[in-house]
Amino acid sequence: MRMTGERLTRQKILGTAAVLPFVSVCGLAAGFTVGVFCFALISVNGPATRDYIFFWATGQQLAHHANPYDEAAMARIERSVGTPATNRIGFMRNPPWALPLVYPLGFLSPRAGWLLWSLFMLACLAVSIRLLWILYGRPRNSRYLIGLSFGPALLCLIYGQTSLLLLLGLTLFLRLHRTQPFLAGSALALCALKPHLFLPFGAALLAWVLVSRSYKLVAGAAAALAASSAITFLIDPQAWAQYAQMARASGIEREYIPCLSYLLRSWLGANSMSLQFLPAALGCAWALGYYWPRRQGWDWTKNGNPLLLVSLLVAPYSWVYDQGLVIPALLQGAFLTRFRNLLIALAFLSALVEIALFRSIWQPTALYLWTYWTAPAWLVWYLVACTPSTRWAKAWSALRARKRFRAVRADIRNYAG
């Protein structure tokens, strides 16, 4: 009995020691984010240096019944609250049905709006992680921390971007699509805030709706978008015409966008924006080919995650803070894998994103140059983590057998010579 107790104690100590690096990296990442956020909150022009100020200025325009896509007016508002002259003037490029989200910011000061907006996005992240933890069987470990401390998601909080709202909509869809398809469709409508991030995922989703006849989900999404568009019309009846004018004059085809699709277009030296959609088109074709042989036993909780990872990889334009959308896939891999070193590797890869943010203080382009690798890295990590350990064992045994065969063959040749 005494030996058994000592063995259990030793196993607990070894288990704690193995998990400690993972928990430490996750905790440091979260602490860094809290520090950056508090510094931005107390600094004089903190909110004005974040992307959040685009949404706040849009709310101000809407509250005064003005054009939310008027670049001159947006510049005047953003500069008046302290946006540095070196920062670009921005405005919302989301479709007009997103305008009701920022309308309340028009009645708040920049700092009060920044605080409420950040708390709202933090709640989206926390609720998403909680729902995913339930969805994956309530595992009794601390691996969910990778979601709460994931570098791109924390960058989304720091910048005040909206990608975590898309993550919440996606997670609600995964949670509700079996039992309450209408509500699942309504939640999925949140992903329409940035539809370009879901093109292969959307292609497979459309095929699944047609095959499974899940028309209640389509009805829910249509109802949610119709309601949001109706509210937009009440706030700004000219929103769609103003948005169309902005889209024609935005010049996004001339902007530097740190994603692989932009790299492909720039390497080929082409000015055509259509070339930037080529990876997404290929991704949609792959998604349909991936879905079709699995259609009878399709499970969005498991089969949808590769679609998410590929969608982010081939998106025609995306930023590193959009990659918080891969959290469902990474959590699935984290809960499945038996290799603690893989968890530690993921934590360090996630932390590198925040190191790039720190580096960008001295070199503004560092954040983008350091994060080209992220979308492929999450996909590779997921594939490795979700591969059964028995398959890796067989592959390792085959490799060792091949090495032994080569060694024996070399000995025979040396002997014969």
Image: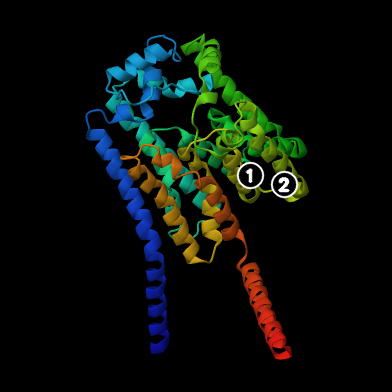
Which residue is painted at 27% across and 35% down in the image?
40
Image quarter in which the C terminus is found: bottom right
How far apart are the alpha carbons under marks 2 and 1? Answer: 9 Å
Horizontal and vertical percent position of residue 201:
64, 39
Task: Name the amino acid, label 1.
Answer: Leu
Horizontal and vertical percent position of residue 412:
72, 87
Task: Name the amino acid, label 2.
Answer: Tyr
Q: Is residue 221 left or right of residue 41?
A: right
- Tell me the colour scheme of the image: rainbow
Report the front residue among 89 and 217.
Answer: 89
| Badge 2: residue crowd in 10 Å (few <14, some 14–19, many ≥20) | some
| Badge 1: residue crowd in 10 Å (few <14, some 14–19, many ≥20) | many
Which residue is painted at 35% across and 26% down in the image?
87
Q: Is residue 56 left or right of residue 176?
A: left
Report the front residue among 251 and 339.
Answer: 251
Residue 125 appears in the picture as rendered: no
Residue 276, relative to residue 35: is it above or below? above
Identify the residue under disc 2: 290
Residue 52, relative to residue 28: is it above or below? above
Name the element at disc 1.
helix
Horizontal and vertical percent position of residue 89:
39, 21
Which residue is painted at 31% across and 21% down in the image?
108
Residue 268, relative to residue 108: is it above or below? below
Horizontal and vertical percent position of residue 207:
73, 37
Report the front residue among 136 and 202.
Answer: 202
Q: Earlier in the sequence, mark 2 or mark 1?
A: 2
Identify the residue under disc 1: 307
